[in-house]
Image (cartoon, rainbow, N blue to C red):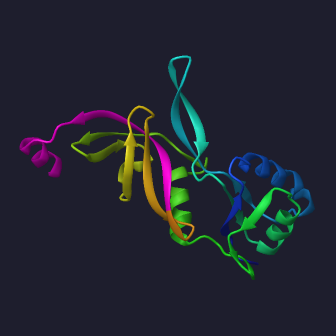
Amino acid sequence: MNKVMWYAVWVRSGQEDRVLELCKTFRHYHPDAYEECFIPTYEKYRKVKGQPTKQLAHLLPGYLFFVSDHPQELQKLLKRIPEFAKTLGDDDGAIPLYQEEVEFLQRYTGDERILKMSEGYLVGSELVVTDGPLKDYQGKVMRIDRHKRTAVLELEFLGRKMKVTVGLEVVKKSIVTKRNRRMHRE
């Protein structure tokens, strides 16, 4: 029996949900193709009729993820799907995700495959996350949009540096003084 691995499939951006449904529809031809097929999402706020409402958005637009121990069957299934673009890999077939990439997805999106909203505050230009999945995140925060309640993270993923938008509520912003800089370090 093969080892269960995670694979990424590139699809045309905006077609992720359609391809996901096609994979589920065509699965009866290849029942061993995958254990799980998903699109990782993140929570974000959007104003609907003037009220902030939580919604879900694709965490990695243009990608579907499969958990499978039969990559050959997965390839056969994907060849049946007209909108399918390609499995990330080489001429010999799909290459599984690196363990760090799998751990990132598992840790931050959990079993629901949803990166929940995080909360924090700014001290000067430094972000301190106090609640949510990003609480212990050690990566690089590129930009924070307080109005849209999002942050853009830079991560090494799928063999390249990617900018990924996540939900982040910044509840306050402090001006840096000697006193609060010292308190923040302790």
Which residue occupies 73% across, 77% down? 2
Total numbered labels:
0
Which residue occupies 75% across, 61% down? 35
Task: Find residue 135 and report its horizontal and vertical position in percent.
Answer: 37, 49
- Horizontal relation, residue 51 to residue 137: left or right: right
Residue 103 or residue 140, whichever sits in front: 140
Which residue is the extreme one toward the right?
Answer: 29
Task: Find residue 50 and report its horizontal and vertical position in percent.
Answer: 51, 17
| Residue 26 vertical placement versus 89 (above, below) | above
In the rendered image, which quarter is residue 79 located in?
A: bottom right
Residue 74 or residue 93, whichever sits in front: 93
Residue 135 or residue 164, whichever sits in front: 164
- Horizontal relation, residue 90 to residue 73: left or right: left
Which residue is the extreme one toward the top?
Answer: 49
Can I make out residue 137 in this image? no
In the rendered image, which quarter is residue 71 located in?
A: bottom right
Q: Where does the magenta region start and end?
A: 162-186
Which residue is the extreme one toward the bottom?
Answer: 92
Which residue occupies 22% across, 42% down? 123
Quick check: is 52 in the magenta stretch?
Answer: no
Can I make out residue 95 in this image? yes
| Residue 108 vertical placement versus 121 (above, below) | below
Task: Find residue 64 and report its horizontal and vertical position in percent.
Answer: 69, 57
Task: Find residue 77 and report its horizontal and vertical position in percent.
Answer: 85, 64
Quick check: is 174 in the magenta stretch?
Answer: yes
Quadrant of the rendering where the N terminus is positioned: bottom right
Which residue occupies 72% across, 54% down? 12
